[in-house]
Image: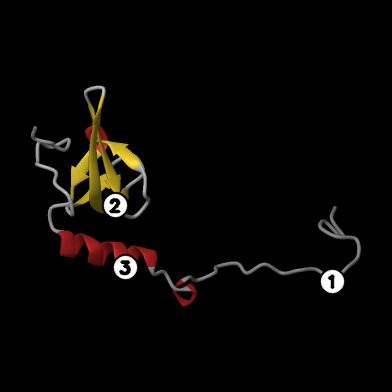
C-alpha cells in the first residue's frame, strides 16, 4: 500500500512532514492503518496524525533553517513604542482623571 500526503507525494518512515492544521513538523516514526484510515506518528510530538492532513516537506534543510529563525526571537529585537509606566500613587489607574 502506498501512503500519500495531501499533494500526492509518498510518505515513508524518517521523512520530514508537516501537519497542516497546527503546522507541527517532525519525522515519521510509525505508520498505522486502522479501519481504512492511515495514521502517522511524528517524533516531535509523539502523536498520531491522519495522513489526509500531512504534507511532505520538500526541502528539509531550507525549511529547518527557516523554522530555527522563527523560533529564535531575541528580546533585544523588540522595540517598545510606548513603554508602560507604573504609577506609585495609591489611588491606582485613572488617578487625577477628569
Q: Quadrant of residue 92?
A: bottom right
Image location (x, y in percent) of residue 11: 14, 43
Give me the C-alpha separation between circle 1 and circle 3.
Answer: 40 Å
Residue linked to disc 2: 25
Q: What kind of element bears circle 3? A: helix
Q: In which quarter of the image is residue 59?
A: bottom left
Q: Residues within 10 Å of mark 3 (few under 14, many from 20)?
A: few
Residue at 32%, 47% in the rendered image: 23
Q: Which of 94 and 45 is in front in this view?
A: 45
Q: Residue 88 carries which label?
A: 1
Q: Nearer the viewer, residue 54 or 27?
A: 27
Q: Residues within 10 Å of mark 1 (few under 14, many from 20)?
A: few
Image location (x, y in percent) of residue 26: 28, 54
Residue linked to disc 3: 69
Residue at 55%, 68% in the rendered image: 81
CB atoms at circles 1 and 3 under 8 Å apart? Answer: no
Image location (x, y in percent) of residue 9: 9, 41
Residue positioned most to the right: 90
- Foreground tag (1 vs 3): 3
Sequence-wise first label, 2 or 3: 2
Q: What kind of element bears circle 1? A: loop
Sequence-wise first label, 1 or 3: 3
From the viewer's perspective, is 37 left or right of 90? left
**Vertical side of 78 occupied by 23: above or below:** above
Amino acid at each position: 500500500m502506498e501512503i500519500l500526503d495531501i499533494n500526492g507525494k509518498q510518505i515513508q518512515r524518517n521523512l520530514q512532514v508537516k501537519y497542516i492544521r497546527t503546522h507541527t513538523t517532525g519525522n515519521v516514526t510509525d505508520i498505522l492503518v486502522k479501519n481504512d484510515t492511515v495514521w502517522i506518528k511524528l517524533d516531535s510530538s509523539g502523536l498520531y496524525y491522519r495522513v489526509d492532513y500531512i504534507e511532505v516537506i520538500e526541502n528539509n534543510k531550507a525549511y529547518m533553517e527557516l523554522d530555527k529563525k522563527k523560533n529564535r526571537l531575541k528580546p533585544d529585537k523588540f522595540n517598545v513604542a510606548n513603554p508602560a509606566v507604573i504609577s506609585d500613587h495609591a489611588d491606582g489607574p485613572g488617578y487625577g482623571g477628569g
